[in-house]
Amino acid sequence: MAEPVAVIDESGEPNPYLMGVYAPVQDEITAENLKVIGEIPKDLNGVYLRNGPNARFPARGRYHWFDGDGMVHAVHFENGRARYRNRYVRTRAFEAESAAGRSLWTGVMENPKDNPFGNTRGLNLKDSANTDVIFHRGKVLTTWYLCGAPYGMDPLSLETLGVETFLDTLTGDFMAHPKLDERTGELFWFDYGPRRPYLRYGVVGAGGRVEHCVELDLPGARLPHDMAITAGHAILMDLPLYQDMDAARQGRYKLTFNRELPSRFGIIPRRGQAHEIRWFEAKPCYIYHVVNAWEEGDEIVMDVCRVSRPAPAGSGSPLARMISYLKLDARMHRYRFDLRTGRTREESVDPDHNTEFPSIDARLTGRRSRYAYNVSVKDAATNLFDGLVRYDNVTGAKEAYSYGEHRYGSEAPFAPRDGATAEDDGYLVSFVTDEREGTSEVQVLHAADLTAGPVARIVLPRRVPLGFHATWVRADQLKGGAG
């Protein structure tokens, strides 16, 4: 199948996030009877879905990787066979540009003043729902990294089901990484923006309605990306990275990392009121993604991928500075928040390896988990995931797997095998793209032994561009529809 002509932007500079392994694909296909190298395990049943940016039209101005239209790529595993499908997320912006036949929005690097509309918080950027994908009550929710509307999709057909309003109880926006507690059926989220209230925290109950929402006071507008939950609490973040408001008033997007401010972590009971939040301070940093959090006696433990230099001193053209800002440089890190004393302890778990996009057994979200499965980030100008790393929180052991030269993967969620009895009793599933050949496959690895290599490689009929977050939906979830 011939590749479509690459989408370009108006900068006049070659943009690496529109080329090679990132170049968008613009057709939507369904493919069965896929070639398999090795054997797909018969006890691997469910669907692997990965979201990501996939621009359809030439960008207005300079293209930022986060600007692309959301596209979900999925592989459904059933009884040793696999089927591939990809579909755009039909957001309001997608439909408006489809009708116009061209881009209507500028991206985050351009002045958004004349954009048609944005999110409900007045951020006039294109909500493309291109960031995460999470299963909830029979559908998957696609979300946007700067806080927007969650869009529901059917996990098998990938039909867009429209904005998820949680039975008409959601007001405002929804962050990129909500947390689902499978034991209670509750979904935890926050909403932030450039105007007061700077942060809202809420809970969707097991019945699918927003049952709790509180406004939380912050010193100013912030850019929180993720949160954590435990059995009894939620953890929210006030980190010293924020948009430069003077630049914003001039129509420019500029981030400021203030090393004079501490990182603050707000711990609140799951259904707590604003006055019940307790703030814990730590060294300045930024955190894109939480691994997991849990309670140990009077302490709350939280593992994260910590970025100590979130705003590098980029030089050169605006495009060059964008590329330097995008580059991930994170390390596994642990916080301990003592609820008795109010003190914070922090320690580096792995100071040497740049790893991100963590995955755990999703059934243990908010409870102590032993294993974390992270992507390994290559030392390169752009974000390239060149392998996987498994961390053992009990022994401290680390096991790494490389995809090989010029081969790059995706976030690899843990997929428990049918009847699994342990949190490494299953598989990791990832798209892998060969930069030289322009081809993609799905790799299935034993979670308990990454170094053994893939037990199955499913050859795909098309290249899958590198993207963002992924999830695994088990067969019992597909049948039962429960979160």
Image (spheres, grey):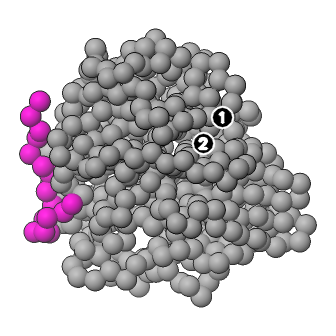
Residue 348 shows in the view: yes
Which residue lies under the disc numbered 1?
423
Q: Position of residue 430 (x, y in %)?
A: 41, 37
- Which residue lies at the image location 11% right of the left edge and 40% below the top edge? 4
**Image position of 357 (left or right of 106):** right
Work out how far the residue at label 2 is from the one at label 1, CA to CA, in angstroms. 8 Å
Coordinates of residue 230 in the picture (x, y in percent): 75, 49
- Kind of residue indicated by mark 1: Glu
First in sequence, mark 2 or 1: give its number: 2
Left or right: 1 in relation to 54: left
Element assignment for label 1: loop
Name the foreground residue: 479 vs 197. Answer: 479
Q: Is residue 253 above or below residue 28?
A: below
Asked if labels 1 and 2 touch by Cβ distance under 8 angstroms, the answer is: yes
x, y (%) of residue 107? 28, 62
Question: What residue did someone put label 2 on?
Answer: 360
